[in-house]
Image (spheres, rainbow, N blue to C red):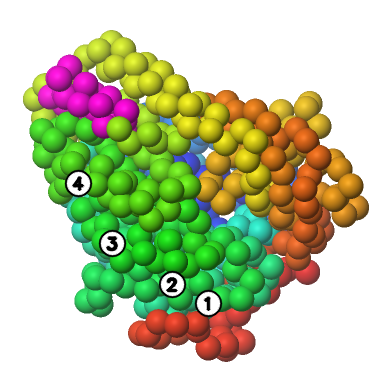
Amino acid sequence: MSRTYHIRTFGCQMNVHDSERLAGQLESAGYVAAEDGSAADLVVLNTCAVRENADNKLYGHLGHLRPRKKDRPGMQIAVGGCLAQKDRGEIVRRAPWVDVVFGTHNIGSLPTLLERARHNAEAQVEILESLETFPSTLPARRESAYSGWVSVSVGCNNTCTFCIVPSLRGKERDRRPGEVLAEVEALVAEGVLEVTLLGQNVNSYGVEFGDRLAFGKLLRSCGSIDGLERVRFTSPHPAAFTDDVIDAMAETPNVCHQLHMPLQSGSDRVLKDMRRSYRSSRFLSILDKVRAAMPDAAITTDIIVGFPGETEEDFEATLEVVRQARFSSAFTFQYSKRPGTPAAEMEGQVPKEVVQERYDRLVALQDDIAWQENKKLVGRKVELLVAAGEGRKDAETHRMSGRARDGRLVHFTPDGSAVDREVRAGDVVETTVTYAAPHHLVADGDLLSHRRTRAGDNAEAGLRPTTNGVSLGLPSFGAPPPAPAAAQGGCSL
């Protein structure tokens, strides 16, 4: 009988994609996904070290798992990700019931480490200091039938004082363009309609093989892949943002007019202390160029409130940039110390109550701006890729949810004469916006069109793409040649 597994993922999109790779390896090793995570033979915690209280959350989860493991002889617990890379053997010392600890550089070792822990009846801790196998060479069990992540690089060459990621994921390593395009093509062959290109600083892609225009070329090459309807990317760094990327976004039909670019602070003094190698004027000039080329572009960002030394004047500068930028949404964070980062040792740590008050003001301003911008879309036709699990109240309201091409979330009524049998996640519909809120739109009229897709067929059948690792080593751009059988993969039927 196959052993079952359950993966709990914490943190960013990179971790979500790593978890897809972990699932792919486990299934290649004979494991099957548990229908009920609480009854799994193996629980994998894929951790993040960026969020506040990450350590407490991990050890809290491990504490809950301890009695379950005691009652289930043979159950195994594995901890991976950034917090594992940071804490290493400390995890087993504090939670001796953990079987395996592995780092960000050796996610491909998990099945071997599990078997070794079982055979030796003792915990296995393996943390490498550099990348052992590029994650893209590993199999992946994808979470979505219609949308997929594709890494273009791992690691980061920046030294932002608040960020621990470079020390845990290492220097930037870039994949060859042919490998990226082959993985995209493999996903599209499985019915996937949308891909998101991932990188810690996605637009610095190409630095390792000496082509500073590589990312714009990659976007254009994605435009030649038949069946690929939407291309997104996250997250670009303002300092590395070049005009050719804007041109590629505007001129490649399947590249979505959506840009998520972290601001972090609107104060030039704070940006300098953060070691962010741009200033607010540079950031705003990029937005001006994007909107000149794509007036319909939706721009989102990340902002940190209460960085050490931030004064009221600094914070007011952030509010002013937010007013000028007109973000459609923003991920806002209260600064918290991350051990091992330079900012954690800086003088001028801002009192919690001051940070909270500033945070509340920022959120109120951004919500008001987002609402104003969303109101402009009422009465406008939008094309939606229907999603699963996006609307928490869909069952109550009898609506479904989907993402517009600009990334906005739209809750819609799946009714009207245009509906072909029924609307499923993965299908594509057109509708008209009837109501705007700060964080979503509503379309309660009849659908204008409904296109059933292979992605919708797969979603309805409960199928998810399982892609084998891609490692072709192709150095050129353009549509990739047909991948060899070993590199194509297919749905687990």
Question: Of marks 2 and 3, which one's residue comes earlier in the chain?
Answer: 2
The disc placed on residue 224 is: 1
Separation (CA) of disc 1 from disc 2: 7 Å
Separation (CA) of disc 2 from disc 4: 25 Å
Q: What amino acid type is highlighted by mark number 3?
A: Asp
Q: What amino acid type is highlighted by mark number 4?
A: Arg
Residue at image point 69% right, 68% down: 191
**Quadrant where the image shows the N terminus:** bottom right
Q: Which residue is mark 2?
A: 220
Separation (CA) of disc 2 from disc 3: 14 Å
Q: Secondary structure at mark 3?
A: helix
Per the rendered image, the range of residues in magenta is 303-323
Q: Which residue is mark 3?
A: 243
Label tally: 4
Q: Is residue 175 in sight in this rendering?
A: no
The disc placed on residue 282 is: 4
Is residue 462 placed above or below 366 in the rendered structure?
below
Question: Of marks 1 and 4, which one's residue comes earlier in the chain?
Answer: 1
Residue nearest the observer in this picture, 486 or 151: 151
Separation (CA) of disc 1 from disc 4: 32 Å
Q: Which percent across, then down, holds residue 59?
A: 44, 33
